[in-house]
Amino acid sequence: MDNRRDNPLRDLIAFLIAAVACPVAVFGGSNLGCVGQGFNASCAMAAVFISPLMLIAAGVLAGLVTRGWTGLLIVLLGVLAGMVSILVLSFGVGKVVPLDPISGVIATVWFAVPMMIGYAIGRVVWGLFATRT
């Protein structure tokens, strides 16, 4: 059985994790932040804290699945795909996200940083367990 770590399937899985994590963090984070209290200002603040945690968790999973600079690039491309999917989903739901280049870059950085932190944590965890074998 081939147990190489640079398998393209692993890169695809990491890409899908990152691409799905962005819309899940937006829509799921807002829903988790607003459970039991309705949509209001305090609910929005709770979602701001929940969404990065979801992105960090997804980054850890992606870091455990893939590795190296190629894996990091794959995860960044997944974040970009996830940001585009947020835009497409918002048009589909009817709640259009305001689109201008500056806010798009800020939102992409806002989503990419927790994902990269999670990726680094996943790589450190993988490295720690790899030294045990």
Image: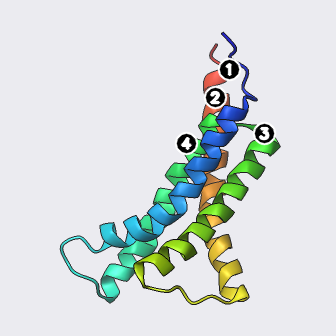
Q: Secondary structure at mark 4?
A: helix
Q: What numbered label is drawn on residue 131?
A: 1
Sequence-wise first label, 3 or 2? 3
56 vs 100: above or below: above
Three-letter code for the amino acid on which mark 2 is drawn: Leu
The residue where tag 2 is placed is 128
Local packing at callout 4 (Cα closer than 10 Å; few below 14, some 14-19, many 20+) is many
Q: CA distance from mark 1 to mark 4?
A: 19 Å
Q: Nearer the viewer, mark 3 or mark 1?
A: 3
**Residue sticking out furthest to the left:** 36
Left or right: residue 7 versus residue 25 is right
Q: Nearer the viewer, mark 3 or mark 2?
A: 3
Q: Position of residue 101 (x, y in %)?
A: 72, 86
Please tell me which residue is depicted at 53% across the width and 50% down the height of the picture. 58
Left or right: residue 119 versus residue 37 is right
Q: What numbered label is drawn on residue 61?
A: 4
Three-letter code for the amino acid on which mark 1 is drawn: Thr
Q: Position of residue 32 (x, y in %)?
A: 31, 66
Query: From this viewpoint, is residue 101 visible?
Result: yes
Q: CA distance from mark 3 to mark 2?
A: 15 Å
Three-letter code for the amino acid on which mark 3 is drawn: Gly
70 or 122, which is in the foreground?
A: 70
* Rendered image quadrant of residue 78: bottom right
Sequence-wise first label, 1 or 4? 4
